[in-house]
Amino acid sequence: MKLIISHNKPDFDALASLALARLAHPGAVAAVLGSTEEQVEAFLHLYRDQLELKIATDIPLEEVSELIVVDTSDPRRIAPFDSLIGKVPVTLYDHHRRASPAIPAVKGLHRLVGATATILTLLLKTKNIVITPELASLALLGIHEDTGNLSYAITQAEDYEAAAHLLRCGASLSLVQEFSHEYYGSQHRILFNLLMSSATEVDIQGHRVVVASFQSDDYVQGIAPLCNQILDLHGADAALVGAEMGGKTLLIARAREGSIDVGTALAEAFSGGGHPGAAFARTELKLEQAISLALAAFERHSRKALSAQALMSRPVKTVLDTASIAEAQDLLVRYGHNGLPVVDKSGSLVGVISRRDLDRALRHGLGRSQVSGFMTKNVITATEQSSQRELEQIVQRYNIGRIPIMRGKKLLGIVTRTDLVSARHQTDKLALTVEEKAVKKVLESLPSGALETVRKTQTLLKDGALHLVGGTVRDALLGTGMQDLDIVVEGTSAEVLGTAMQKAFGGSLSCHLDFGTCTLRLASGLVIDLATAREEYYQHPGALPNVIPSTLRKDLSRRDYTINALAIRVSPEPAQLLDPYGGLNDLNNRVLRSLHPLSFIEDPTRIIRGARLGGRLGLSFHPDTLAHMKTALNPEVLGKISKSRLRSELQLTCAEPRVSPALKLLDSCGALKAMFDMQADEIMLKQLDAQRREHPIPDESYLLVLLLSVPDKHLLRHSNMFSWPKRFLEARKFLLRARQADRVDEDSLADSSEAVRAVLKTLSPVLRSQVEHFELVPQRRKLRGRDVLDLGLSPGPQVGQVLAKVAKARADGQTTSFEAELKLAKALIKKLALQANTHQE
């Protein structure tokens, strides 16, 4: 069983992630671990049937073959399923900072965005997997909850992108509004009053932190939102709520952007969890001691608040109170200011005059009048220690554009609206380039187990360079999650590095020296594909390549599509993106572009592989690539490639989780017709995909649909060329008869395979109904040819005669059990024996 699990006491983001992960992993079971908050429980009561979530306590640990964890990387938060780590493969999707220690997942996706629902929503969007309105509403609710309605500092552009996609999927904003608001009972109102009455403020690096606490003999759920309210009501930079309940102390922290990293602080002090702006922790310590440790950690992880001393401009341009209005106007124009402090002969501040004041005086012809008659005399000032937040509050309260900064009576500088706005939007470092952002995204996205393997492999490499390549880079940039780890090495061989890795990590290593590749399979489930940087050449079109060692650039040049020719050099550091063919731009444009015009001439099967990739990731072929295909899709080129290779590629395509998009691409570019003399029935294929989302169906079903499109006059030649099994042809004949008659009898259904029944469901509503009824009703055992032979009748036409008479009796209701059919068969065999004896006499 593939099991999807989240942290105990799941919130809306965890709940949504469970349901979304079911779409990403067809056939997996999702289970809720632990109790839920009142609002989450209310939602589950209403939508339980749509979500199809199990209770975790009902899942036997020994039946779990793969673990898929969402919304946490902390193994302690998934107990008792943490006992499966190291025993079964683990896939993980999470948006929090990696826990320490973190679940050593080898597949999945890690992104520092606002919600895990964002990660999975964009993954499903990339793969063109439909999200129902009900699930879209839950996912949008999870995003809103974790991002504070898309306003917390952790909110990223991806969260807005995911929210927009969910709205297009039919998400209900009224549902989000209903369930995202907390409704407090009398107990919560009492606790809130206790917290407000106990609240005190402390200063940490210039940030105002409000601290409140209470003690209760009983555990009270749903107190986290109270921390948000206290933060807002106090207008502070951060808030810390401590609650000693049921013998344990719970700490909840909130912080505004750019103040204190409460997530790292509580993780360091108590192994808590969360984000820079929102975190929690549990501890055995008493309340007072826990709060003291938390504040000390806040001190270590706070960003010193900007003060007026850092923000102000100096020296200050001033104007004398005896200067004329015209002179003051000239100063403003010269310096490009909107106002000036006014000083007397001693340099003391006596007022402020604005451009508007000057303009008004000039309109009345008072240019020769003194500034002192028009200036504002009651000047609002601040000290050099005033924080950025305090300065902003002054501007907001008094609607003034500039604040003189004073030390006693001395004017030190001035802070303007522009200074404050610039400070609010400044970044700590220069903006990353597109390439640097790509590197950061890929390394951040790797699951913990895979990232740790890469880091350790760097230390094993004595010489040369280590590169992440191909699908590892592509899928991380697309946000579809890592499957395998693809590595190319320069300066040594894949065999040498693979041997060193096996010695360090264990696992099984297999190498193909002729191709310069190795595969290392670890006990954790991580599969590492290693390759020596190499180049290749083809003896003739359609031939397998000849491979020789070379450089990374040559290695990338031998790949099929630009999006697969991306690499990130991780050793030697610093990490660097290598994109010689514009793959990053093609990824952003969501197109498949071949590297050179002869790509498909050298190997036409690249067209099929491209269609698989495009169908899986929602990509389309670039117009230039389609033009290159036409040259390769002619009999002269296709005749040089073996039909067994073509057949293998088609079978791999039919093994995709969603087959219809890939076959549609093959059909639309003409490759399906040119290579296989087949056409794609999009409606039937989409129906098979819908069945596959609900339960596994054989790949053979898709091949049978394609075979239905082969003209009868070409069938024999087609079958001989591709060596299709005889059962395929018999199944095709049966399906054509069923489609023509629009019915099928029960005996035929009993004799048909699962693959055939899946196709029958796509032929017509009537046949679908018949098959579904057959599969729902428990089938009693029926007499078969083997049973007749076991009764002593020799192989021959008489076996069929007995089976036909028994089948008629079954259809007429004369037999209602296997035992009755067996009894009738014995009687018929006895009668045949008597007839034979009479004939001999």
Image (cartoon, grey):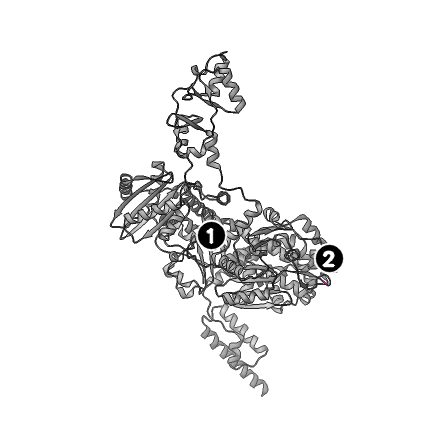
Label 1: which residue? 20
- Residue 565 lies, with reference to residue 235, above or below; the image says below
Q: Is residue 680 visible?
A: no
Label 2 Cα neighbours within 10 Å, binned few <14 / some 14-19 / many ≥20: some
Instruction: Give the extent of the magenta segment.
Output: 538-546
SS state under label 2: loop
Q: Position of residue 210 (x, y in %)?
A: 33, 40
Q: Which residue is mark 2?
A: 634
What residue is rendered at 56% in x and 47% in y? 436
Count every numbered label the image shows and give the total.
2
Hey, what amino acid is under mark 1? Leu
Q: Is residue 667 magenta?
A: no
Of the pair 667 and 412, the residue shown nearer to us = 412
State the CA–CA distance, disc 1 to disc 2: 43 Å
Type of amino acid under label 2: Asn
Q: Main secondary structure of the magenta part?
A: loop
Residue extending furthest toward the left? 217
Is tag 1's residue or tag 2's residue first in the polypeptide sequence? Answer: 1
